[in-house]
Image (cartoon, rainbow, N blue to C red):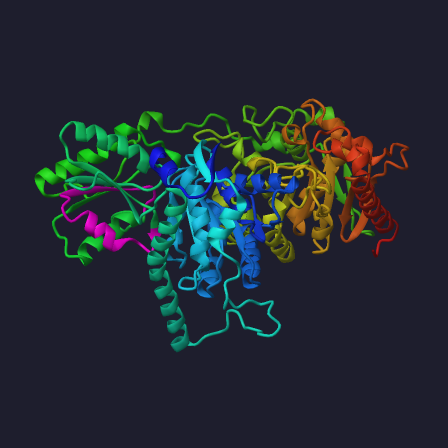
Amino acid sequence: MAMDIAIEQGTAKVEQRVVYESGNEMAAYAAHQINYHIMGYFPISPSTEVAQFLDLMKANGQHDIKLIPSDGEHSSAGICYGASTAGGRVFNATSANGYMYMLEQMPVQSGTRFPMVMNLVCRSVSGPLDIHGDHSDLYFALNTGWPILMCRDPQAVYDMNIMAIKLAEDPEVRLPVLVASDGYFTSHQKRRVHTFAKREDVQKFIGEQPPAGFPHTLDRNNPITVGPYMNEPDYINNCYQQSQAMYRAESVFERIAGEYALLTGRKYEMLDLYRMEDAEVAVFLMNSASEIIKDVVDSLRSQGIKAGSIAPNMIRPFPQRQIAEALKNVKAITVGDRADSYGAHGGNMTNEIKAALFTYGNTTTQVISRVYGLGGKEFYAEDGHHLFSLAIEAAKKQKVDVPFDYYGHTPGDPDKAPKRVLNPLRFEDLKTGLIQVARNEETGKLGVRIPPLRALTKKPKRIAPGHGACPGCGIFSGLELFFKGIEGDIIALFHTGCAMVVTTGYPYSSHKATYIHNLFQNGAATLSGVVEMFWERKRRGELDYLGLQDDFTFVMVTGDGGMDIGMGPAIGAALRNHRMIIVEYDNEGYMNTGAQLSYSTPLGHRTSTSNIGSVQKGKVFHHKDTAQIMAATHIPYVFTGSEAYPQDLVKKAAKAQWYAQNEGLVYGKILIACPLNWISPDDEGTNIVDAAVNSCFFPLYEVERGETTITYNPEEKGKRIPLVDWLKTMGKTRHLTKPENSEALAEFEREVNRRWQILLAKHEHPYL
């Protein structure tokens, strides 16, 4: 909010300090002062930093919040819901499609009336994929039963987070509360912020927790049933009570905001009205853009135009009465929605404002609807002048010529239509015949013969150069080596992740073959649909016109933690045994969102959510063995590979193709280097992953028809190295080599050796 520093400093009753921080930092700062019990989280830009900042503070012992990294946003919502039923204070942050993935859980939380606070750092909802700020995720929140507070700058993010928990826990409300700020505009923009200097003043303001009378699942003397099955008479009564609580949240918020103003000098009304006392034309905008429009108001006022602006500090419950009062003398208002409500002839805020005017008998104020700023498109003063010009024109004419439209879009130019830059791969260049795969009828296993690798260099690359990967990124060297073993045409699906983002910047693409994108959690299911449609259309003869010389090989590429959030659908696809390959590039973290820990991150390794500090020494639990999990689904073929052992990987790729075309699903895991986030030289990737293999951290093996074979044994070759020699090659793990971390190193060594011994036993005994 726009602050009057003199008034604020003159009226504040608590000691405050000034910091210069971003919205994400202030959300985390408020959370650490509140000292929540639990935060269940999952990284997604631009909200990821909230958990990162809290983890960094946690590493240095600045708060007691238990940070629980989940396997996906749906899971993080479940963690938070479960924690809130157990009576403690709960916190979360998310954005965009992450919120969509949570969405099923949102009405569960509010319908059972368990308080918590979640920060929605607003971002475009894909597809197509865009990670910048608009309100398309926020509008999905409107019907979930959560009160929604709005934050136009980092100061408001801090203040609203402190007021939100008090609002959520108020006995008259008892609902989870959403705090919404604009992704990248507010979340990453640093501004001067006034905070409580002392944590105890925050704690005193929000009060003791849990409030008296709050039921919870840990009370042995008062066992409760949470979320029972209800028939219609009870269900409608439950919804009525929830509705009443939502409307009470308005007056409760006003009371809390008044108390907060007495302490801090910062006052938040339901509406932030700027020069509306005699306004004849107005613009309604939310969050970050609502500050820019104030300069436009001042400019128009200097020209004698009675202009004003409206911005809500709360949109659930919607401030209907206040809107009607503010607009009673306004001739025309332009409502800017940073998201469309497709087919509704206006964005959500437009239609809510129209409803408010209708309810209070205002039939004279003209309302113009414009959707603006999608995908993070900047909003400037000249854009504000345009929105006001629409209202000024409507006020003069007393009618609206174009009630609804987009603003800021551009007409298509036929001369600039995307043109093919890369020629499609030719089948004859891809089907070399140099790789021979034969099945042993006695053992049922495959034998593979490959030519010298130099003979395969004539095969064209599947992915064109010119992508935007970091120097030394191992994704494409690893994938291209794998693709050398694949003959003929492929159709590839890439999860969201580094490999996807750096190869498909519209209107260009580095992919020479058909490429599909879907989100982390649903890639395997999506590709399985493509696979089954192919075989069914082929069975019906509908693809004969294509003159296919061979069947496609269907490949799903995942990485950057995609086998955490995507594990369930991958197992489902494996159990259905679709004829496809899932190949995971394992870079040991969520590198596309800034190197957060994933379940593939090993014990003790440093990431941006497993920091090194005085009380925390990196990741606190062991890495997930995805290959063994997938092998347990009894699919035909599972393998691990490394670019440091090219013949081994090419042979496994050839086997993978045969099984995927003839029997069912294949899973492969390739360890790849990420110099940026491993903190390693960008020309040492191959040597580093080689050391990972020779230390037995990443053993090379295959599970073919249920039988495990180690394809490279460093002990037999006399090349096994101590685990610490691999750890020394990366900045993210060098702390483990220090004497004070010897216990963590020893635990990591024990686990690596335990898994290696199990693998050796499976190699020796085919029934294991």
Q: Is residue 410 above or below residue 334?
A: above
Front residue of 409 and 299:
299
143 sits left or right of 722 in the view = left
648 vs 347: above or below: above
* Percent position of residue 720, x then y: 87, 34
Q: Relative to the observer, which residue lies in front, 190 or 443? A: 190
Left or right: 156 as drawn, with respect to 650: left
Q: Residue at x 18, y 36 (%)?
A: 307
**Which of the 4 quarters of the picture holds residue 281?**
top left
Quarter of the image with the N terminus is: top left
> In the image, residue 321 lies at what x, y percent?
23, 55
What residue appears at the point 18 percent right and 47 percent down from the top-left corner?
Answer: 327
Residue 441 pos. (x, y %): 80, 51
| Residue at image location 87% in from the left, 32% down from the top | 719
Determine if the magenta segment contains residue 492: no
Q: Is any part of residue 631 visible from this angle?
A: yes
**Image-based side of 83 in relation to 673, left or right:** left
Q: How many marks?
A: 0
Q: Nearer the viewer, residue 115 or 475?
A: 115
The residue at the far left in this view is 397
In the image, the segment drawn in magenta is: 315-340
What residue is at 55 percent from the left and 30 percent from the top? 425
Residue 282: image quadrant is top left
Is residue 334 one of those drawn in magenta? Answer: yes
Residue 582 rendering spot, x and y as whole percentages: 63, 45
Q: Quadrant of the C terminus?
A: bottom right
Does the rendering let one see residue 580? no
